[in-house]
Image (cartoon, rainbow, N blue to C red):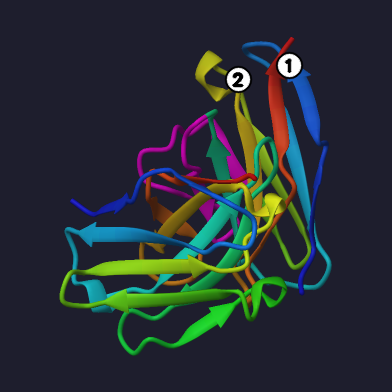
Amino acid sequence: DIQMTQSPSSVSASVGDRVTITCRASQGISSWLGWYQQKPGKAPELLIYGASTLQSGVPLRFSGSGSGTEFTLTISSLQPEDFATYFCQQANSFPITFGQGTRLEIK
Amino acid sequence: QVQLVQSGAEVKKPGASVKVSCKTSGYTFISYGISWVRQAPGQGLEWMGWISADNGNTNYAQKLQGRVTMTTDTSTSTAYMELRSLRSDDTAVYYCARVLGDGYNYYYWGQGSLVTVSS
């Protein structure tokens, strides 16, 4: 199975800050990576697929990069609605696997 | 619009079985597979498996092999996930999910079904 390791597991930041979350795959997955945002009591929402393609309707302050085994999600200027938990997910092969999540908290 | 509507919360005793449904609408059911993902309280996301709505082919997470069965009913555009021999660590919110197009990143999600396993 492909292991997905996210870091950090939690981060505190302020509105307007730039935040970067990293996801590392245990083997190469090309660009088969997605990023999700999840708020309490809600299903995850797909933000980015193909490592860097922004899902329609997602604000431009979100961006993704990387390929192979190293990936990043960047939020350029945090807004109040961005405080949530973020997960990466590899879509290269079964079994599908997720990172353990990064909780983004208000400082 | 595409919708995935799941069945309600369930409380089960250890050793029992649960069957969660996911009724879809807004698209041609057999054109996309359905995956199931669960999330234990305060924990991350765990992929459980996938079923082709076209031919019923399945791919299950190894740790659930032998306890999980995913099926579909094309006449009602509904997917089902049955989990047997329930344990306390199966307590979780269970989601069905569908991709938008190619690949296996999930755009459409059900609202989630809480399954509580408790004696």
Q: Quadrant of residue B16?
A: bottom right
Whole-percent x, y for residue B116 in the image = 56, 44
Point 47% across, 53% down: residue: B95
Observer-nearest of A36 and B79: B79
Q: In which quadrant of the rendered image does the N terminus of chain A lie?
A: bottom right
Relative height, residue B51 to residue A33 (above, below): below
Residue contact at pointers 2 and 1, CB within 8 angstroms: yes
Q: Is residue A18 visible?
A: no
Q: Quickly name the residue at label 2.
A: A78
Q: Quickly name the residue at label 1.
A: A13
Point 38% across, 68% down: residue: B80
Q: Quadrant of residue B21?
A: bottom left
Would residue B1 be found to the left or right of residue B8 on screen?
A: left
Q: How many marks?
A: 2
Give amino acid for label 2.
Answer: Leu
Would residue B45 be found to the left or right of residue B54 on screen?
A: right
Q: Quadrant of residue A92?
A: bottom right
Which chain is mark 1 on?
A: A
Point 18% across, 51% down: residue: B1
Q: In which quadrant of the rendered image does the C terminus of chain A lie?
A: top right
Q: Which stretch did the figure color magenta?
A: A41-64
